[in-house]
Amino acid sequence: MHAGITQFWDRVRAKDPHADYRTARTAYARATVRAMHAAGVPILAGTDAGGAVSIDILPGFSLADELELLAGCGLTAADALRTATLNPAKYLGEEATAGAVAPDKRADLVLLDADPLTDMGNVRKIAGVMAAGRWLPRAELDKLLAGVAESAVMKK
């Protein structure tokens, strides 16, 4: 993360070192999501990254946290996965070209080493990513992450 963001997080923690932002956010979110899901409201995964209460929420990485939270809110594992795949495609009017693995749809996807339907934590076990027609195996993803980390250190 950019040094300015982590410094902001440090300032928020310093003002109230006993505040457990993540626990409060999670409890509120669980109650809200349970009620919305029970009422049939379509749900989209999101990480709330960038907001004032977004302490320690890392864009991209925290999506796995979000999916685990959704699976703990009464959604089936399949429903939780749809919040990050099919449901956004429907919302954006792109269901014909995105949101599922099928002929004539964009082949942007994450290949996992383990089944998230048996354990949502398995969404963290990424074997590779297909993005814009390019296959990025785990080793290449790790190199990209190392480059980003190195760049972030140099900017501090």
Image: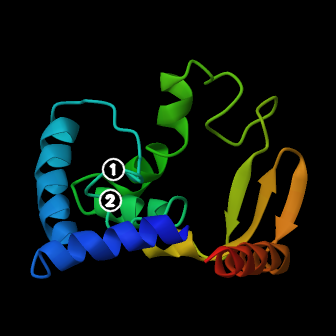
Q: Residue furthest right?
A: 134
Per the model, the C-alpha gap separating discs 2 and 1 is 5 Å
18 on left or right of 57 = left
In the displayed structure, 76 sits above or below 62; it is above
In the displayed structure, 132 sits above or below 14; it is above
Q: Nearer the viewer, residue 127 or 101?
A: 127
- Residue 27 in the image, given as x and y percentages of width and height: 12, 61
The quadrant the C terminus occupies is bottom right
Q: In the picture, residue 38 is in which quadrant?
A: top left
Label 1's element?
A: loop
Residues at marks 2 and 1 touching, judged by CB atoms closer than 8 Å: yes
- Residue 3 seen in render: yes
Q: Badge 2 is on which residue?
A: 54
Q: Badge 1 is on which residue?
A: 51
Q: In the picture, residue 73 is in which quadrant?
A: bottom left
Task: Identify the residue at image location x=40%, y=72%.
Answer: 7
In the displayed structure, 134 sits above or below 104; it is below
Task: Identify the residue at image location x=44%, y=65%.
Answer: 5
- Residue 26 in the image, given as x and y percentages of width and height: 19, 62
- Residue 92 in the image, given as x and y percentages of width and height: 54, 23
